[in-house]
Image: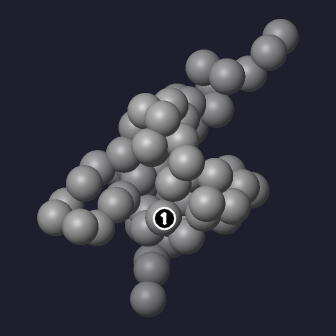
Amino acid sequence: MQTANNRTDPDTLLTEVQAADFLNLSVRTLQAWRVKVTGPRFVRAGRAIRYRRSDLIGWIDANTVA
């Protein structure tokens, strides 16, 4: 169970499914971006892929068109 701090902590590691939900994208889109080395930064821990909440927010900010 996540606490309120985990849901707002910028260093919280999100699973692929949680990251896709956060960005309102499909998991397949994130997977395709990883293969193309585009999209948000990610962490590889063995075979597991995780995304820092702060990296997702930074990616959103960097791709926001004024």
Q: Residue at x 60, y 63 (%)?
A: 27
Q: Residue at x 74, y 56 (%)?
A: 24
Q: Is residue 56 above or below residue 37?
A: below
Quarter of the figure with residue 9: bottom left
Q: Position of residue 25 (x, y in %)?
A: 71, 55
Which residue is the extreme one toward the right? 66
Of residues 41 and 61, the one drawn nearer to the viewer in this rendering: 41
Which residue is the extreme one toward the top? 66
Q: Which residue is mark 1?
A: 16
How packed is label 1: few (under 14 Cα within 10 Å), some, or many (20 or more)?
some
Note whether residue 55 is visible.
no
Q: Position of residue 58 (x, y in %)?
A: 52, 30
Quarter of the figure with residue 48: bottom left
Quarter of the figure with residue 62: top right
Q: Position of residue 36 (x, y in %)?
A: 48, 35
Q: Residue at x 45, y 80 (%)?
A: 2
Of residues 36 and 42, the one drawn nearer to the viewer in this rendering: 36
Q: Is residue 4 above or below residue 28?
A: below
Q: Which residue type does callout 1 highlight?
A: Glu
Q: Is residue 24 above or below residue 60?
A: below
| Quadrant of the image containing the C terminus | top right
Q: Residue at x 29, y 50 (%)?
A: 43
Tally the marks.
1
Q: Does residue 49 appear to the left or right of 66 in the view shown? A: left
Q: Does residue 45 appear to the left or right of 11 in the view shown? A: left
Q: Dot 1 lies on which element?
A: helix
Note whether residue 44 is visible.
yes
| Quadrant of the image containing the N terminus | bottom left
